[in-house]
């Protein structure tokens, strides 16, 4: 059966005649329809292709689901994401200035955080990626959005785990050892941190594995065992043991150094992260006498950068691990004009009585809460800079803030190329 794509819904759902919905077709393309699982249309199914289509470079693209746009030329990805945000603003009857997308100069191999999961194939441990919406792990080590040197380290970890006959964990039988491997890479120094997540405390020959890995990849500065004592979908739990090195690496933005531990929240795309934070601070136009409040402050990345411009920065973080990293980063950089608060943001905002010239918020993908937003309306900071990794929840929250604020501009940033996700900075000013 021949089908024609009429339009896209939410960037990824291809709508054809008779409301048939498939994946990986572009508007006006014609294809032969084969009723596969998840209604995936492969490259070789296309009869008439769009001018925006490009050759798919990944052999597991159609089964993995981690990337959405490997079949689309980069410029068209940018246009689609910009249009998505534009329509979102328009649909909610908001009048503002939508700025041109800040593009990614490296739309492939940009991720400096890699997570792979372990599986067993012919009684041999293999590392790979979870198939979308399933428990199936696809053995693959060369993901095209992950840093290439990180992928090389990942291949060596797999080789060493096999060499020392370390079995993969089987979730159904609750046997085996290795669950996941995570790698972080510093953009400034190229140093790497490697985490091996295990079922229980046992990791036979752990020190030999770490030693062999460091010999082959000298930029690996530390190897950590993350210990799981229960079944969980989480990659990292609280209990850890440092097998080699200091247990952390460092990264640098401008002249500020950041300590990165295994669980530190840190953007996965360092080049775009620097653009994101610099743009956010430029939009904020922080003055030397300003008091800045950084909510959801994580390891203090934005707070430390803002401290160079402001009189005082108050940074609030509820996560204990991130708060401790922020304390270390403050001390290491000898910054005296930051007050770090370990607290729930809603509770702190409601109790705070001082002035705030600029409030910066960077919540999770779920967005903020009504309690937080109403506390903001009571606090009345002169400016709000809202950084979001989901424009839908960002716009939802902005609609609440419009009771007391004017939305000056929205700045999209292509942080996650080849995927549907897009970062967005909104500047709001008090009415």
Image (cartoon, grey):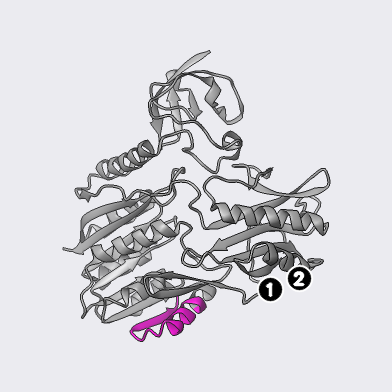
Task: Examine the rendering and report whether any part of residue 175 can be seen.
Answer: no
Is residue 192 or residue 231 the one in the foreground? 192
> In the rendering, at what x and y percent does residue 323 appear?
48, 76
Residue at x-position 76% and y-position 58%: 160
Corner quadrant of residue 297: bottom left
- Give the secondary structure at mark 2: helix
Horizontal and vertical percent position of residue 326: 46, 77
Crowdedness near tag 1: few (<14), some (14–19) or many (≥20) residues, C-alpha within 10 Å: many
**Can you give x and y, in whole percent of width and height, for residue 70 in the image?**
49, 37
**Magenta-colored stretch includes residue 329:** yes
Q: Which residue is drawn at 41% across and 58% down?
A: 271
Q: Name the residue under label 2.
A: 207
The C terminus lies in quadrant: bottom left
Q: Distance between the residues labelled 1 and 2?
A: 7 Å
Q: Quadrant of the rendered structure where residue 261 is?
A: bottom right
- Reply above or below: 300 against 104: below
Task: Give the labeled residue for mark 1.
Answer: 244
Q: Earlier in the sequence, mark 1 or mark 2?
A: 2
């Amino acid at each position: 059966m021949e089908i024609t794509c009429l339009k896209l819904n939410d960037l990824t759902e291809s709508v054809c005649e008779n409301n048939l919905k498939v994946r990986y077709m572009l508007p006006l393309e014609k294809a032969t329809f084969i009723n596969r699982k998840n209604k995936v249309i492969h490259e070789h199914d296309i009869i008439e292709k769009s001018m925006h289509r490009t050759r798919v470079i990944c052999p597991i693209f159609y089964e993995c689901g981690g990337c959405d746009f490997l079949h689309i030329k980069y410029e068209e990805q940018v246009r689609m994401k910009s249009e998505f945000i534009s329509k979102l603003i328009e649909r909610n009857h908001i009048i503002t200035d939508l700025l041109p997308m800040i593009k990614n100069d490296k739309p492939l191999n940009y991720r400096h955080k890699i997570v792979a999961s372990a599986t067993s194939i012919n009684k041999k441990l293999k590392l790979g990626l979870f198939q979308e919406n399933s428990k199936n792990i696809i053995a693959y080590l060369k993901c095209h959005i992950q840093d290439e040197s990180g992928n090389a380290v990942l291949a060596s970890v797999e080789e060493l785990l096999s060499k020392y006959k370390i079995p993969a964990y089987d979730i159904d039988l609750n046997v085996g050892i290795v669950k996941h491997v995570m790698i972080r890479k510093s953009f400034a120094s190229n140093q790497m941190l490697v985490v091996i997540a295990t079922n229980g405390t046992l990791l036979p020959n752990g020190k030999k594995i770490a030693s062999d890995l460091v010999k082959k990849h000298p930029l690996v500065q530390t190897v950590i065992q993350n210990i799981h004592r229960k079944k969980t979908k989480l990659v990292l739990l609280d209990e850890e043991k440092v097998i080699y090195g200091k247990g952390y690496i460092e990264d640098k933005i401008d002249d500020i150094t950041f300590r990165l531990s295994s669980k530190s929240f840190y953007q996965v795309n360092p080049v775009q992260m620097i653009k994101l934070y610099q743009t956010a601070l430029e939009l904020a136009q922080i003055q030397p006498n300003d008091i800045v409040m950084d909510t959801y402050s994580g390891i203090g990345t934005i707070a430390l950068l803002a401290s160079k411009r402001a009189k005082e920065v108050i940074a609030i973080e509820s996560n204990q691990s991130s708060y401790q990293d922020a304390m270390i980063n403050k001390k290491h950089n000898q910054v005296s004009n930051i007050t770090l608060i370990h607290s729930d943001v809603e509770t702190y905002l409601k109790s705070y009585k001082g002035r705030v010239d600029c409030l910066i918020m960077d919540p999770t993908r779920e967005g903020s809460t009504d309690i937080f937003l109403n506390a903001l309306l009571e606090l009345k900071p002169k400016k709000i800079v809202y950084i979001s990794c989901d424009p839908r929840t960002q716009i939802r929250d902005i609609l609440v803030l419009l009771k007391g604020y004017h939305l000056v501009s929205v700045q999209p940033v292509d942080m996650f190329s080849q995927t549907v996700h897009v970062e967005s900075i909104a500047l709001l000013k008090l009415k």
